[in-house]
Image (spheres, coloured by chain):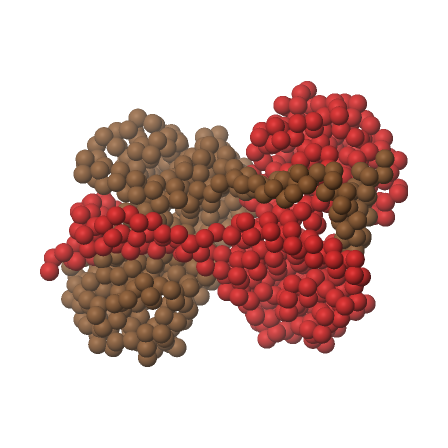
Chain colours: A brown, B red
Amino acid sequence: MIRLIAPDQWERKPVSLDSALEQRVVKVIKDVIANGDSALRDYTSRFDSVDLKSIKVPEHALQTAWERSEPAWQRACENAAENIRRFHQRQLPESWYLDDGDDVRLGQRVIPLDSAGLYVPGGTAAYPSSVLMTAIPAQIAGVGHLSIASPPDPSTALPRQEILAAAHMLNVSHVYSVGGAQAIAAFAFGTESIARVDKIVGPGSTYVTAAKKLVFGHVNIDSLAGPSELVVLADSAANPKWIAYDLMAQAEHDPMASAILVTADRSIAHAVCQELEQLLPQINRHKIAGQSLRDYGAAIITASLDQAIQMVNTIAPEHLELMVSNPWDVLEKVRHAGAVFIGRWSPEPVGDYYAGPNHVLPTGGAAKFSSALGVDDFVRKQSVIGYSERRLGHVADEIALMAHSEGLDAHARSVKIRFSG
Amino acid sequence: MIRLIAPDQWERKPVSLDSALEQRVVKVIKDVIANGDSALRDYTSRFDSVDLKSIKVPEHALQTAWERSEPAWQRACENAAENIRRFHQRQLPESWYLDDGDDVRLGQRVIPLDSAGLYVPGGTAAYPSSVLMTAIPAQIAGVGHLSIASPPDPSTALPRQEILAAAHMLNVSHVYSVGGAQAIAAFAFGTESIARVDKIVGPGSTYVTAAKKLVFGHVNIDSLAGPSELVVLADSAANPKWIAYDLMAQAEHDPMASAILVTADRSIAHAVCQELEQLLPQINRHKIAGQSLRDYGAAIITASLDQAIQMVNTIAPEHLELMVSNPWDVLEKVRHAGAVFIGRWSPEPVGDYYAGPNHVLPTGGAAKFSSALGVDDFVRKQSVIGYSERRLGHVADEIALMAHSEGLDAHARSVKIRFSG
């Protein structure tokens, strides 16, 4: 089911820049810039098999979706939202000023974005939880205008019911029945129905990701999401069946998702493989999970726990479960992982839905240089420099010297003129 | 010299995606990936007219550069560095944990990047101050390995002396005599001489910017820098000569730099224009500054101070000088600007070199969605989720319900199995 390999046999699957795909996406973006809503309707008809009456989802449809959902599901969502709010509230940065003497005041003002566009994927990976994970940090930051784009289902000509219900719960009233690269183009450049936004966030298909990279610069984006990943780091005390379920939960996302066990205990690795053989047929999405496990899964057998931790840092996974006896000690040695799940009672779904930290996380090794989506993604920090006559007089010569060393004499003069009467 | 225009006559010069330039940059990147150092030598010979003996600048050359520089300049740099350190120290985020009851512990660990590459432009825009502004936040963050790339001068076959001296002052010992898209490719993919880095920061030419956008995803980048900009917001009390110098200081950077006066007082606008006519011939870089003022400069006359502030928010300039009687009050209404300079004693060069806040700032309207370079650029935030048996037991049904609503039954099972014996 999954390959048992040595540490040096692991290699990251290269993410090739598919330039043919990029060319198709460029065409979609140009078409949306040129033709606006009419281009959105065309692509939605072609790719989603839906003839849109209205690009914007009517607000009563959001309310209806909420009212028709199960009360127990509503309560779960409300509790999850409350947890997500509590965690992200702690991230909210504050403006500050430094008094630097001589009446000099330096500072950093925190200002929310005017607007943000939240992309929520559709299809087999339609996650209402992504509405919570993207909208709540934006709301805590104080973003003025929030909108959601998600592709419509052919059966209803609307995004999935749960997505609409979650939007209603969070009072996000601008929801658009558009997906793919065309949705990203609409957010970046605006159409008759969809207002341009300052930043686009949220995961998506390879088309969505390519479009986000192309529009980056015109607007801001969060990061370039790839397939989801889990590494389970286990020692001899770990329960093979629980590990098998955790790996399958990862693998059921997507045939390209990757679920990897890293352990110094070969017998655990064998036991997990046996459990997987037995359990896989029992889950609904066994075809997807099986393909993912065969193509991207692995059990990496290391010589020691330390080498296993080193392996984790090399992989830099999106999600890491520490199924070891002393997880908090091991955590101190983990440099590269997007989110770490501590011990046997923290399976990944706890974080995917409920605990509070964000589930939009860096993938494909990007945990080495990026962070989870958070409140910081929805604010800007503006520098403030308030100098005084006294201080400027004291340091004018030093500033002029630095300016001259760069050959910029007007820089020097703009300071000196203020003291030359 | 500069056009006097009404607010509705201003429009942002479109930044076109020059696909011919992008194709050339793709070629450079592929060449560096395939041929490493040998490609770097070829391009440096072709573009910089330098035949490199060593790609890495010998460490003794850094020391020599420092020792040969003027003591007064050394002191100015040390004082500027101290100010920059004090400001950025205040930005350093701390790891934190939330105790969520039931032995549940959630947190966010702040972890510095393993490595970062600092790009420092050469040519007429060779700024040793950029060494300070990029290296100091990285050092405060605790980045493990820092390196600098800057194109060599034909006269010395090394980057400019002041850049080497600044690197020495800050103990950055890995400096490479390589510029342009080839330097960005080397940082992103590594060569025999240059180690791959996790993040590339710093401003550069259109080639450098195109290369940064292309490698984004393989590594992280800071932002996509365009030509530098200043808006001076002035009321009747402002000094036209000082404003003229401040605009010239901006314009001398680059023929594409933009220096704009916004005022509700037409007579101030006329006075500034007259000063510019008189003063421009006196500055060394009057050709560059003249071209910039003619092509990208403007005096925008508004009907009121409020309309002037609105104009500022529309432009979202990189730098904003508030040359008004009540600058701190006006600041409260400024949403979109990278850095704000308060009052008559805060000309832009104070921030370019000395005061402490960063001079790597969002350009081209990106102040609407991006921030100055800072310590945050050099760390990642890792989420930590430590659930307990008791809490997981309480919420297992809610998590399972949310998982089922997304069609992910293995997610539900991975939680429930832990309570099924």
Q: Nearer the viewer, residue B200 or A413?
A: A413
- Residue B319, horizontal then vertical, whole percent: 66, 40
Question: Residue shown at 70%/28% (left/top)?
Answer: B324
Residue A241 seen by the camera = yes
Question: Is A332 located above or below residue B52 in the figure?
Answer: above
Tell me what residue is drawn at x 66 percent, y 23 percent.
B305
For this view, does A235 lie left or right of residue B300? left
Q: Residue furthest left?
A: B421
The percent coordinates of residue A103 (x first, y second) are 66, 38
Q: Foreground residue, A233 or A418?
A: A418
* Closer-to-camera residue (B26/B287): B287
Question: Is the N terminus of chain B in the top left, top right, bottom left or bottom right quadrant?
Answer: top right
Seen at 23% across and 45% down, the residue is B402
Residue B12: percent from left, percent from top = 65, 36
Quadrant holding the C terminus of chain B: bottom left
Q: Quadrant location of residue A254? A: bottom left
Q: Is residue A122 visible?
A: no
